[in-house]
Amino acid sequence: MMGIRFKGKHSKDFKVYFKTENLPLIAQKRVSEEVVLGRDGSYKFEGGYADKSITLNCILLENDLILKRQKAREVAQ
């Protein structure tokens, strides 16, 4: 099962589930531009790709409000 491990406990132990909000398929190219004094225009350099940022929504599934608060406190500690 996919999930995260935090302080030695897996997210499934707390009934915490994740949903991807934003999952980019292709990273943006890293482009830098240098201007040289005394010359017209500029030089462009392409060097690899930028980091991809993945946004996740976190859901704590528990029907009982008291248990939900207790689990949220356990995760926060």
Image (spheres, rainbow, N blue to C red):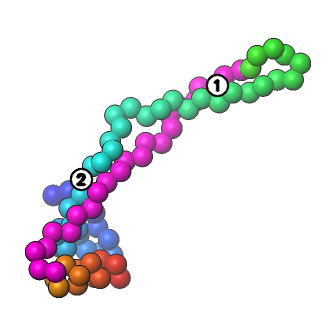
In the picture of the structure, the residue carrying the numbered disc 2 is 19
Tell which circle, 2 or 1, labels the residue nearer the N-terminal end. 2
Crowding at label 2, few (<14), some or many (≥20) Cα neighbours within 10 Å? few
40 versus 37 height, above or below: above
Taking the image as drawn, is residue 5 in sight? yes
CA distance for labels 2 and 1: 36 Å
**Residue sitting farthest toward the left:** 63
Crowding at label 1, few (<14), some or many (≥20) Cα neighbours within 10 Å? few
42 versus 5 height, above or below: above
Residue 36 sits in quarter: top right
Taking the image as drawn, is residue 3 in sight? no
Tell me which amino acid carries mark 2. Lys
Residue 42 sits in quarter: top right
Give the camera-side residue of 58 and 65: 65
Is disc 1 placed on a helix, strand or loop? strand
Residue 26 location in percent, x, y?
38, 32
Give the camera-side residue of 34 and 73: 73
Residue 16 sits in quarter: bottom left
- The stretch of residues the image draws in magenta is 43-65
In the picture of the structure, the residue carrying the numbered disc 1 is 45
Q: Residue at x 69, y 27 (%)?
A: 33
Q: Is residue 49 a member of the stretch shown in magenta? A: yes
Q: Residue at x 27, y 49 (%)?
A: 20
- Left or right of residue 26: residue 17: left
Q: Residue at x 59, y 26 (%)?
A: 46
- Left or right of residue 26: residue 13: left
Residue 4 location in percent, x, y?
28, 63
* Position of the N terminus by quadrant: bottom left
Is disc 2 placed on a helix, strand or loop? strand
Residue 74 location in percent, x, y?
28, 82
Residue 24 location in percent, x, y?
36, 38
